[in-house]
Amino acid sequence: MALLSKKDRGLILDPLADNNPITIQVLGICSALAITAQLKASIVMGISVMFVLGVGNVVISLMRNIIPSKIRIIVQLVVVAALVIIVDQVLKAFAYELSKTLSVFVGLIITNCIIMGRFEAFALGNGPWRSFLDGIGNAAGYALILVIVGFFRELLGSGTLLGFKVLGDPIAKTGLYGIGYENNGFMLLSPMALIVVGIIIWVQRSRNKALIEEN
């Protein structure tokens, strides 16, 4: 017997492509623009959101029948705030320099539209297992875009990946720098993140015409 049914697999796989929370639903754009100048920060933010959304969806699902409708948003905010505090403290304990790089953006996970949207649209109406899969799937779709954007921004903007020099030494003029290549400083600015996301959206829609909206 398969561990995951077709519908369950869809909860994980659909957000990676045709229902991506950033490129299709246009949610979570702020962090995609702000923290993707470094690939490491993109990966850590993606993992953080995956933890918060996966666990948060399960908690909200378990509580769905006892949460009064009038205060459900408050309860959701309390749950996500508690999980974000855990993430923030873990980062400060084990990756302090990276926590300073992410700084306020970890706290802003609390107001991430993807998280609140999945709590409201899915976890309140489904069981814990399917809610967990939905949370992991949407967080993975979010993380995928952050990693792609972070990869190109750090590579083309700094000539590094995860802090390692992969294009050569710009001071000693080795590698690509030896034949005249120069880092594109514009890639480290937030507007370039928006352009990279726009290119991803264009490629995605060119491959799947069904995603093109009718005017």
Image: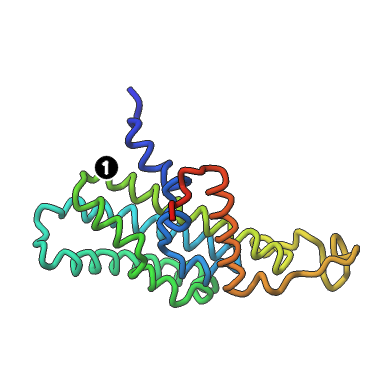
Q: Residue at horizontal 31%, vertical 64%? A: 83
Q: Which quadrant: the N terminus?
A: top left
Q: Residue at horizontal 65%, vertical 60%? A: 152
- Locate residue 121: give its quadrant: bottom left
Q: Measured along the vertical axis of the image, is residue 192 above or below residue 4?
A: below
Furthest-front residue in this view: 215
Residue 166, percent across and down?
75, 59
Q: Is residue 18 left or right of residue 68?
A: right
Q: Which residue is mark 1?
A: 129
Residue 180, percent across and down?
88, 67
Question: Label 1's element?
Answer: helix
Q: Residue at horizontal 9%, vertical 62%? A: 68
Furthest-top residue in this view: 1
The front one of 120 and 110 is 120
Residue 145, percent across and down?
52, 56
Residue type marked 1: Trp
Q: Is residue 64 left or right of residue 194?
A: left
The way the protein has been coloured in the rendering is rainbow
Q: Is residue 110 left or right of residue 75?
A: right
Q: Measured along the vertical axis of the image, is residue 196 above or below residue 123?
A: below
Q: Is residue 166 left or right of residue 153?
A: right
